[in-house]
Image: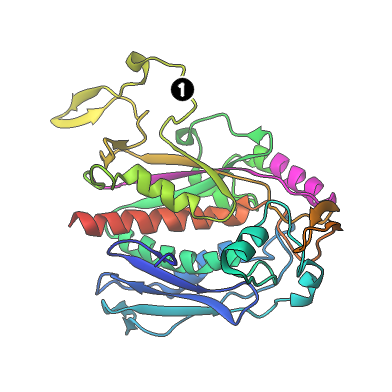
């Protein structure tokens, strides 16, 4: 139950970081959709490790194999099963963490909840689980493209280095022009330098990803516990290391008055429109046809390659220095994950609305 996401469009994922592989079963996908396999693989390539100097150097091909639900290149409406094999795990890197709790990691909570945990790479708590989300998100993007829906996310802040303009002032088609996935090339270089510095120190850094959904139909979302922004928030906060979510102006303009924040309706050549979009494309929990935009804050990765005090399973105080291959900053690889979760949410709520 809690390894499944969605109402009608539904993903159930499985697998661990150092197990046989990671995969999933997608139910409720519309029939007759032409599946671009190259696009699905490209989305996985954006998420995979070892793609640049600022990510973990674990080398995985992350090739997806589909087992069902697709015939002659089109979805059949039946469950779509898929899997990505793990090929480059180094489990002995985690031997010294077997009986030790990494600070701010899931080690302690998993051990106490289940009485057992897979210490190799964090097991199910590893971000490698997000492979299944990216595959399902890629399929959701393909279906949404037929409705004219486009979803783009980008890194808007790393540490104290941040973009200071609205997404409307950037060319979001340039996001892939740098390894940070930032549409401001000068800021991207600064961000990359900071991440490299942090990596050399054996430390980690967090930041913010901004996501924009264009072309979303009017009317997605249900009162009162099925609000669209609540669903997007839930989806984003389910991603590893996500610590905060805001949509529209969020926390930025709480100092403004209602007269300044209200989105004024007007007649635009016979069509009702708004002069501003402070609401972020959602009003009353229901999409209004404007761009939906939101931000997700990600904490610094919990596993550091420097010494930290902690305790072992018996409560004895010890010093831990983690080994292995870890991201110094999760943001560049989290961009396609944010897009995937947004796509899955919008497609699911579109199907619910029908």
* Residue 104 falls left or right of residue 220: right
Tell me, yes or no, if residue 193 can be seen here: yes
Tell me which residue sits at (28%, 79%) in the image: 78
Front-most of residues 75 and 240: 240
In which image quadrant can residue 53 be found? Answer: bottom right
| Image: 137 above or below 208 | below
In which image quadrant can residue 75 be found? Answer: bottom left
Front-most of residues 167 and 65: 65
User: Mark 1 — residue?
Assistant: 253
Look at the image and tell me in which quarter the C terminus lies: bottom left
* Residue 247 falls left or right of residue 74: right
**Count of picture labels:** 1
Magenta stretch, residue numbers: 189-217
Look at the image and tell me in which quarter the N terminus lies: bottom left
Find out whether residue 212 is within the magenta segment. Answer: yes
Q: Position of residue 200 (x, y in %)?
A: 84, 51
Tell me which residue sits at (46%, 17%) in the image: 255
Judge the density around disc 1: few (<14), some (14-19), many (≥20) Cα neighbours within 10 Å.
Answer: few
| Image: 349 above or below 288 | below
Tell me, yes or no, if residue 64 can be seen here: no
Find out whether residue 287 is within the magenta segment. Answer: no
């Amino acid at each position: 139950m809690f390894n499944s996401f969605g109402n009608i469009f539904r993903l159930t994922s499985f697998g661990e970081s150092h197990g046989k592989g990671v995969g999933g079963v997608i139910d409720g996908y519309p029939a007759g959709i032409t599946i671009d396999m190259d696009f699905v693989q490209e989305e996985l390539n954006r998420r995979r490790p070892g793609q640049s100097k600022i990510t973990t150097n674990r080398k995985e091909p992350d090739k997806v194999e589909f087992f069902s639900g697709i015939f002659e290149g089109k979805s059949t409406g039946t469950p779509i099963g898929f899997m990505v094999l793990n090929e480059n795990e180094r489990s002995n890197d985690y031997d010294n963490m077997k009986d030790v709790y990494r600070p701010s990691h899931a080690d302690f909570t998993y051990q106490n909840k289940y009485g057992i945990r897979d210490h190799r790479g964090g097991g199910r708590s590893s971000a490698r689980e997000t492979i299944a989300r990216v595959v399902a998100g890629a399929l959701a993007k393909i279906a949404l493209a037929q409705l004219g829906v486009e979803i783009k996310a980008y890194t808007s802040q790393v540490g104290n280095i941040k973009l200071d303009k609205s997404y409307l002032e950037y060319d979001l088609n340039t996001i892939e022009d740098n390894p940070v996935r930032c549409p401001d090339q000068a800021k991207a270089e600064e961000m990359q330098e900071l991440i490299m510095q942090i990596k050399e120190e054996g430390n980690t850094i967090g930041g913010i990803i901004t996501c924009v959904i264009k072309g979303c139909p009017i009317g997605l979302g249900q009162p009162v516990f099925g609000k669209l922004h609540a669903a997007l928030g839930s989806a984003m906060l389910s991603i590893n290391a996500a610590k905060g979510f805001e949509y529209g102006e969020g926390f930025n303009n709480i100092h403004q008055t209602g007269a300044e924040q209200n989105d004024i309706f007007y007649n635009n050549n016979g069509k009702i429109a708004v002069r501003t979009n402070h609401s972020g494309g959602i009003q009353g929990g229901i999409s209004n046809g404007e761009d939906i935009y939101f931000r997700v804050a990600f904490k610094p990765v919990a596993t550091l390659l420097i010494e930290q005090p902690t305790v072992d399973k018996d409560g004895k105080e010890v010093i831990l220095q983690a080994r292995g291959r870890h991201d110094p900053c999760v943001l560049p690889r989290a961009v396609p994950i944010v897009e995937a979760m947004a796509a899955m949410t919008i497609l699911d709520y579109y199907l619910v609305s029908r």
